[in-house]
Amino acid sequence: MMNYKNIIIIAVLALAFGFLAFSVGFYLKQKAASVELPAEVQVTNQTQEPPAAEITYTEEWSTIFMEARRARDAAKCESISDLAARRDCGDKINLGIAYEDKNIDLCRAIFTPALRDDCYTNLGIELNVNYCRYLSSEEFRNLCNAERTAAQS
């Protein structure tokens, strides 16, 4: 009888911890989404070509994306003719690999600042590491640091 009681207590604690982790991640995302990015946000170590206004998902994109995903190789996206679609393909492949491998260092390969910040935030929370310094905006970094400080108090 005692074993069932311990198992139930452990299961309830695991569910509570999972809900807490999800809630904190959701709260940080909502809080970050409510902050307007300044116009002068600069992305470090990335080329500064502006992406196309809208990405058109063509048969070419689909075929190459599926191939790159199977191979787990974002370099395969380089053969897509449209620059924005090429970057989108590479970002999605790199994001998937970072999440699958639970490797926060792989987030830096993502070009799009919002996706890169999501990668750092989600993996940082999941892996319980300080990811704030990697966020693209000083405002986001400050908000993140304030949230982490408040959570530790």
Image: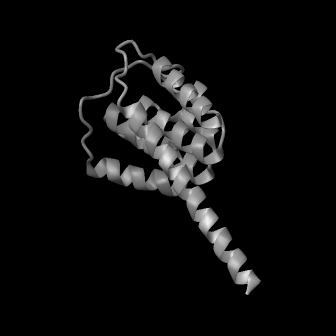
Which of the colour schemes (rainbow, by chain, secondary structure, one colour) is used?
Answer: one colour
Specify whether 4 is left or right of 35. Answer: right
The quadrant in which the N terminus is found is: bottom right
Residue 81 visible within the image = no
Nearer-the-camera pick, 76 or 51: 51
Q: In this view, does 101 lie above or below 106?
A: below
**View extreme (right): residue:** 2
Question: Residue 48: x and y, percent?
Answer: 41, 18
Rendered location of residue 122, percent (x, y): 53, 43
Quadrant, the C terminus: top right
Residue 26 location in percent, x, y?
44, 45
Tell me residue 57's x, y (percent).
27, 46
Residue pictured at 45% horizontal, 41% vertical: 27
Outermost residue on the top side: it is 40
Instruction: Determine which quarter of the picture holds residue 3.
Output: bottom right
Please count the marks in the image: 0
Residue depicted at 41% across the width and 55% down the height: 66
Asked if one can make out residue 29 in the rendered structure from this viewpoint, the answer is yes
Q: Nearer the viewer, residue 132 or 88?
A: 132
Please tell me which residue is depicted at 69% across the width and 82% down the height of the picture: 4
Residue drawn at point x = 50 percent, y = 49 percent? 96
Which quadrant would residue 103 be assigned to in this image? top right
Residue 16, relative to residue 37: is it above or below? below
